[in-house]
Amino acid sequence: MDWVPILAGLIPSIGVGLLFWYAMRAVVRADRHERAALAHSDDAADDPAGETPGDEEHSPHQG
C-alpha cells in the first residue's frame, strides 16, 4: 500500500482543522477575558466607596 496519496489527502484537512481550532480557541479566550473585564468594571461601578460626594442623589441603588 502506498501511503503518500493517503497522507497527501489527510494533511491539508488536518492543517485546516488545526487552524480552525486555534482561531476558535482565540475567540473563546478573548470572550472570556472581555467578560471578566466587564464584570470587573461593573463591580467597580457598583462599589459605593468609589462614588464621589453628591452622587447619592443619582445612585441607581436607591429606590
Image (cartoon, rainbow, N blue to C red):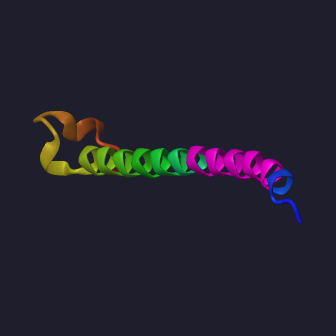
Q: Is residue 43 toward the left or the right of residue 53 in the image? A: right
Q: Nearer the viewer, residue 19 or 13?
A: 13
Is residue 2 found inside the magenta-colored segment of the image? no
- Residue at 71%, 53% (x, y): give it: 14
Pinpoint residue 53: horizontal percent, then vertical percent: 10, 35
- Total of numbered circles in the picture? 0
- Residue at 66%, 46% (x, y): give it: 20
Pinpoint residue 32: horizontal percent, then vertical percent: 45, 52
Q: Is residue 2 toward the left or the right of residue 11 in the image? A: right
2 lies above or below 18: below
Pinpoint residue 56: horizontal percent, then vertical percent: 21, 41
Is residue 15 found inside the magenta-colored segment of the image? yes
Quarter of the image holding residue 55?
A: top left
Q: Nearer the viewer, residue 7 or 38?
A: 7
Q: Residue furthest right?
A: 1
Q: Nearer the viewer, residue 63 or 46?
A: 46
Pinpoint residue 26: horizontal percent, then vertical percent: 51, 45
Q: Is residue 31 toward the left or the right of residue 17 in the image? A: left
From the image, give the main secondary structure of the stretch colored magenta: helix
User: Which corner quadrant holds the N terminus?
Assistant: bottom right
- Residue at 46%, 44% (x, y): give it: 30
Q: Nearer the viewer, residue 56 or 48?
A: 48
Q: Residue furthest bottom?
A: 1
Residue segment shown in magenta: 7-23
Q: Is residue 31 toward the left or the right of residue 12 in the image? A: left
